[in-house]
Amino acid sequence: MGRAHGAGLTVVRWFRYAYLGSLLLFLAGLVFQVYLVGQSLFVDPRDWGVHVEWGWMVAHGLPLLILISAALSRLDRRRWFVLVVFLVSAGIQPFLPQLRDTNPTLAALHPINALLLVGLTLWLLQDAWHLVRVQALPSSTAPPS
């Protein structure tokens, strides 16, 4: 049993690294999105399409990777709660601008939701780093959670 249990922990460790890495990719995607907005505002308005296309990929592709790696990382209930809020926020992000004609007030939440996503991503990153760091330490030297 000891060997199988140890192998299971190794798999969980790798998925926690994948979880951390996918969150880092998401944060990089958000930063790139802000750059693309600036590019389209100050350099070439035709670059707006790149912002839109990249946004769909960041908001739907990467959260799927985050969800899969989180599911295999054995997160506790508190972490899942924050992650679900993050996933809902990421899922609605690309749809908010599409409400421009029917409900401009909701469409105007697009940049505010982006700020929420940055904050949630930073929180999740810090927490994922803690998960990876604590599991890498011997149990006698692990800091309290």
Image (tube, grey):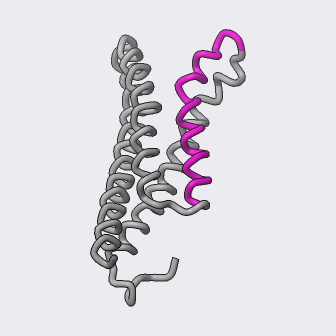
Residue drawn at (53%, 42%), measured in percent from left and top? Answer: 117
**Of 14 and 88, which appears nearest the observer?**
14
Helix, strand or loop for the magenta stretch, by majority:
helix
Residue drawn at (61%, 36%), measured in percent from left and top? Answer: 112
Query: Residue 31: x percent and y percent?
Result: 39, 39
- Farthest front residue? 1
Query: Residue 59: x percent and y percent?
Result: 46, 32
Taking 45 as reference, is 25 above or below it? below
Which quadrant holds residue 27? top left
Query: Residue 84: x percent and y percent?
Result: 58, 46
Tell me: 30 left or right of 105. left
Taking 118 as reference, is 141 above or below it? below
Query: Residue 15: x percent and y percent?
Result: 35, 56
| 44 in magenta | no
Taking 20 as reference, is 133 above or below it? below
Residue drawn at (61%, 61%), measured in percent from left and top? Answer: 78
| 99 in magenta | yes
**Of 90 and 17, which appears nearest the observer?**
17
Q: Across the whole image, how many numbered discs are drawn on residues?
A: 0
- Farthest bottom residue? 140
Residue drawn at (36%, 11%), measured in percent from left and top? Answer: 46
Quadrant into which the N terminus falls: bottom left
State which region is magenta: 78-102
Which quadrant holds residue 106? top right
**Of 98 and 115, which appears nearest the observer?**
98
